[in-house]
Amino acid sequence: MVIFVFGNPDLKMDSLPIKILPGLKERFPEIEFKILDPNEEWEMPQELIIIDTVVGIKNIKVFESLKDFTPAPNISMHDFDAYANLRFLEKLGKIKNVKIIGVPPELSEEQSLSGIADIVNRIYKRRKKLRLPKYNYSQGGYYFVTICTKDRKCLFGEVINREMRLSQFGKIVEQQLFWLVQQYGYIKLDIHAVMPNHLHVIIVIDNNVGNGRDRSLQMKIKSLSEIVGAFKTTSSKLIHQNGFMHFQWQKSFYDHVIRDEKSLEKIREYIQNNPLQWELDEENPNNLPK
């Protein structure tokens, strides 16, 4: 996945995307970020994602089309040359889909990095294949899992003063995470966060448990999908029994196989800070496109 970054470090009005670039590269080592000069010739894929300063917005916003922009002083890309070139390439049929992550020039670096990271994470999750082909998801390791409610309905509580307060249903969800550990001896929970309409958790599968010399203790290790399925089924049943008969989880879930300590620490920090970043979170219904 490639994301193009427009900006000029020498112009305060246009420097924000460049300033936060090191932070984005650190958070998303698997994504290639390319800096482009609007005055240069471009060789772009037909579907592209761009980060650029946008004038006339108060919060970070995703523009799904160039048609969403209007002449200044309303909503416009700061790089007029970039906008003109994109329109020209679009008319020639050289690009089909353009997604622009717009950043208000007045936003702080911290707010910009956090907000854009949430958006990039969501886009990356949508484009990433749900499961790695031929990967054995029952083998030992650390797995980062995100599960959302259907239609992203906020049912598990609310964030007050940047702290998550669990509702009755949120407490059931957290209870069933711990139930997994009790039910399956080879599962551990590293860190988790139950949010208003989704949850993040690092599930650890230890396939050495019960597989030592005593063959009578051997057990079949369930795959990650089976583990998540058990969690979804039992939590849904309990929520139904407690009065919300129409509750449903989103059909699938996002997973990421954590392969090294550096990635593990980044994801732990992301989960821990989730309540702090709720106002900017892409899962927050207030930030979804109207």
Image: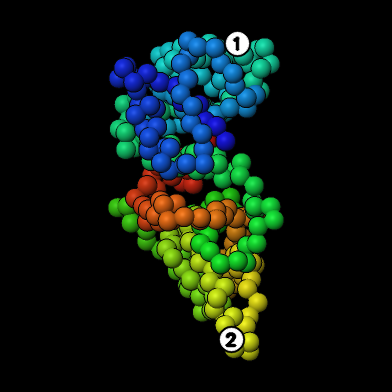
User: Which structural element holds mark 2?
Assistant: loop
| Label 2 sits on residue | 213
| Circle 1 crowding by C-alpha within 10 Å: few under 14, some 14–19, many from 20 | few
User: Which structural element holds mark 1?
Assistant: helix
Residue 167 to residue 98: above or below: below
Residue 170 to residue 211: above or below: above
Q: Which amino acid does label 1 sit on?
A: Phe
Q: Which amino acid does label 2 sit on?
A: Arg
Q: Nearer the viewer, residue 23 or 229?
A: 23
Residue at 51% x, 55% y is 259
- Residue 82 % position (x, y): 49, 14
Residue 114 to residue 239: above or below: above
| Label 1 sits on residue | 88
Using the image, tell me which numbered label, if any, was put on residue 105.
Answer: none
- Quadrant where the N terminus sits is top right
Residue 36 in the figure: left or right of residue 93 = left
Residue 246 in the figure: left or right of residue 35 = right
- Residue 245 % position (x, y): 61, 66
Q: Nearer the viewer, residue 229 or 161?
A: 229
Precedes in sequence: disc 1 or disc 2: 1
Residue 65 to residue 171: above or below: above
Write down the quadrant of residue 148 in the picture.
Answer: bottom right
Q: Are marks 1 and 2 in contact (CB under 8 Å)?
A: no
